[in-house]
Image: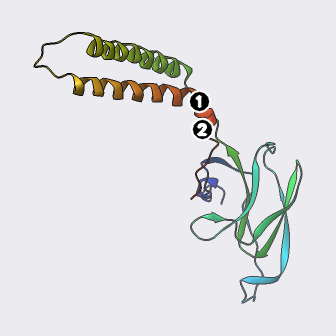
Amino acid sequence: MERYLQPKHFHTENDTIKIMMSPVFSASLPKIANKILTQPVNFTLWHLKSVEPQGVLSCVYWNGSAWVVDGCDVTQTNTTHTVCTCVHFSTFALIMQVERPPETDELMKLLNRIAVSIGLVFLALAVMAFCFCRWKANVNNTARLNICISLLLAHLLFLLVQEFIHLIRPQKMLA
């Protein structure tokens, strides 16, 4: 069953790496009409892999199309096993979520900084040329000057956001 009911079918808000931590198993009782049990049931699931310290363990069950956590909770856990408490019978597993490592390419960051800095220098030169150079009386450079200033500010904002994105990302917008 593990081949078909993979952890990628466990949908969460965060884009995390999901790892199957236990074998998939099913539990049922014959001649039981109620899907919800009056008393919760405990399952002990042995880990297939070592638990990562920053990982989040979730007791999940298969609802027919995806892994979900409704009615199942992690009660206890250690390095070798986890105890799950569920209020229904179904097909169960233990899934661990691990944060994705940041995808950074240092060479691209460096090239981007250099290119934006060169663009800033040339835009500053263009602004100075439009401000200080004398032009014919019938040529109006106001529009060109405004475009150059706007591009200069946009490049500067891009460079600053690139440098300080690590301070911006933790601040989440409230909906």
What's the residue at 40%, 29% (across, down)? Answer: 154
Residue closer to the observer: 46 or 99: 99
Tell whether label 1 touches label 2 (CB within 8 Å).
Answer: yes
- The spot of residue 130 in percent (x, y) is 26, 16
- The spot of residue 58 in percent (x, y) is 74, 58
Residue, far front: 137
- Image vertical order of residue 170 relative to residue 84, above or below: above
Q: Residues within 10 Å of mark 2 (few under 14, many from 20)?
A: few
Residue linked to disc 1: 164
Which quarter of the figure is the N terminus placed in? Answer: bottom right
- Measure how far apart labels 2 and 1 are at the Cα level: 7 Å
Which structural element holds mark 2? helix
* 87 sits left or right of 172 in the view: right
* 157 sits left or right of 54 in the view: left
Residue linked to disc 2: 168
What's the residue at 42%, 17% (across, down)? Answer: 115
What's the residue at 78%, 49% (across, down)? Answer: 48
